[in-house]
Amino acid sequence: MFTPQNQAPYSISPIDPWFNTSTKPAPMFTLQNPTSFQTWRSLTRLLLQSKVLPSEILWQSPDQSSLFTEQPTFPKTTAQIPHVPKHFLDLASTAAAHRTGNQWPHLYNLLWRLTHGETHLLSLPTDPDVFALRAMAKHISRDIHKMHAFVRFRKVSDPSDDREKFVAWFEPDHLIVPLATPFFKKRFAGMDWSILTPDQSVHWDGKKIHFTEGVDQSQAPDSDAQDELWRTYYRSIFNPARLKVKAMQAEMPKKYWKNLPEAQVIEELIATSSARTSGMLETRPSPEKPAPKNAYLEKLQKLPKNS
């Protein structure tokens, strides 16, 4: 919702004289940051149809909203919205998940420019709007990758249901739950599961996905029997001879360790890696085993070399 800055509630209209005279200042509208890409897309359609310039909007987070903010009214119009490239919509839908809220002015500014003659913008990586949004999209993509890698489901019992159910807790950097969900739906289609986060939770019952509000970590299970399986698996794949602590922490940042059952053994494995590597070097190699007999290979070896 938005209103003109320091003015009475104002109905945006493309025929308003404020848009057609240079003797009066352009109105400033205070606009709450959208809550999702879908709400941003609906809102910007109205803004474009009402010919609201990017420079006429002040974007604010909900906790910064003005006491005078009211829901604006828009005139009915049949004005067509110019088409934009699909890769802009892909970029916008990803960047929209950035937690800072800094994406919204960049998105509308880029949209305005794309629909007002600068159709080549997305081919200019150094353009300030393009550069900022692609950097944000990169942060989102990395966060989604980390969620895919570090979600750990724990089995929970439900006496009222014969189906097994699993619950996981995750703390993403950005508002990525809807973007990350398709992976889990495909990967774990055969079980009922819930992923709880502080922002939003997602649930799969074997038939459909549904979203609920975020919850506190106390709503998630602490541990289950599979935790020890994770630790056993991690010990088995850990190679002390190839340990690079900084590289490992770059791929598995410490902020995720508190929710990973296998993280409980990481420091132990790091501390013992030198001794284990020395032991591996001192161990005499096992004698080479003879190759198993293979009649076909033996026949090939007997063939004349020039045949």
Image (spheres, helix red, strand yellow):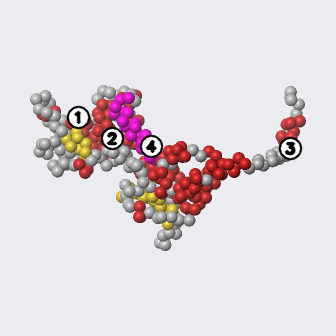
| 298 displayed left or right of 62 | right
- Residue drawn at (29%, 38%) of the image: 105
Mark 3 and mark 2 lie on one chain; the one further toward the N terminus is: 2
Rendered image: mark on residue 295: 3
The residue most toward the bottom is: 159
CA distance for labels 3 and 4: 52 Å
Q: At numbered mark 1, what does the secondary structure look like: helix, strand or loop?
A: helix
In the displayed structure, 87 sits above or below 143; it is above
Whether residue 275 can be seen here: yes
Q: Which residues are magenta?
A: 126-144
Residue 2: x and y in percent read: 20, 45
Whether residue 79 can be seen here: no
Assess whether mark 4 and mark 2 are in contact (beta carbons under 8 angstroms). Answer: no
| 290 displayed left or right of 170 | right
Name which residue type carries label 4: Ser
Residue 32: x and y in percent read: 25, 46
Name which residue type carries label 2: Gln
Q: Which residue is mark 1?
A: 55
Mark 1 and mark 3 lie on one chain; the one further toward the N terminus is: 1
